[in-house]
Image (tube, rainbow, N blue to C red):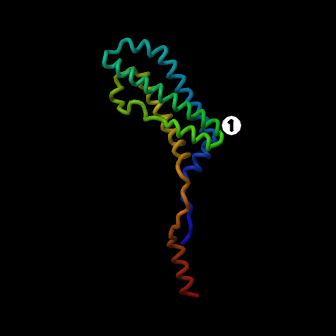
Amino acid sequence: MTMHAQFAPTTLARRYLDTHKFMELYREVMAVVEATANYLDTQGRIERRVLNRTQEMLYSKTSMQLTTQLMQIAGHALVLRDVAERKLDLDEALTKIVESRVSASVENNLAAISELPKGFVDLCEAANRVRSRLFWVHEGLTKQQIEPVPVENMVHNSLEALRQAFA
């Protein structure tokens, strides 16, 4: 039997923090946060006025979920950026991240919010996308390292049997 190390997600996630791709994700998170704040303070206020009572209640509920989720996502992105820039130790960062887990995505039922203004729905979808990508990093960093597992190598066993037969 030979030993093959299984891929450790912790290693990939840690390496990901050191790439330009993570900084792109960080900038995207911050852009969604800024776009959402701008929308809710300007266009969102205008569009909200024309909604019926049911839509307005859904809009209010979803916008509170959205802002809460984005605050959590931005906090996690900032902590991970500090790890990437070596301003914070990974163990410290994981403690901070685990203390404030990212909540579920905003309004999983997109059909329900599809009647709301398109700009708002687009922001909810963008928040869910960056949340999913950041959650992948989070999960990769918090999973336990996978130990090498012995795997039987049939070719090696067959070659060894041939060697012994013709030795």
User: In terms of depth relative to the viewer, which is nearer, 154 or 96?
Assistant: 96
Q: Position of residue 120 (x, y in %)?
A: 43, 22
Camera-side residue: 78 or 40? 78
Q: Residues within 10 Å of mark 1 (few under 14, many from 20)?
A: few
The answer to whether 109 appears left or right of 153 in the picture is: left
Q: Residue at x 50, y 28 (%)?
A: 70
User: Residue 73 location, x and y as percent?
Assistant: 52, 32
Q: Residue at x 54, y 74 (%)?
A: 156
Rendered-image quadrant of the N terminus: bottom right
**Would residue 127 appear left or right of 93 to someone viewing this image?**
left
Seen from the viewer's position, the closer of residues 148 and 111 is 148
Q: Residue at x 65, y 42 (%)?
A: 89
> Horizontal and vertical percent for residue 112?
33, 27
Left or right, 32 with reference to 89: left
Residue 78, image x and y in percent?
A: 60, 33
Q: Residue at x 36, y 26 (%)?
A: 113
Count of numbered circles in the view:
1
- In this rendering, the answer to whether 13 lies above or below 114 is below
- What is the secondary structure assignment of the residue under circle 1? loop
- Going by the numbered disc 1, the residue's amino acid type is Lys
Residue designated by label 1 = 87
For the residue pair 118 and 128, the one nearer the viewer reads as 128
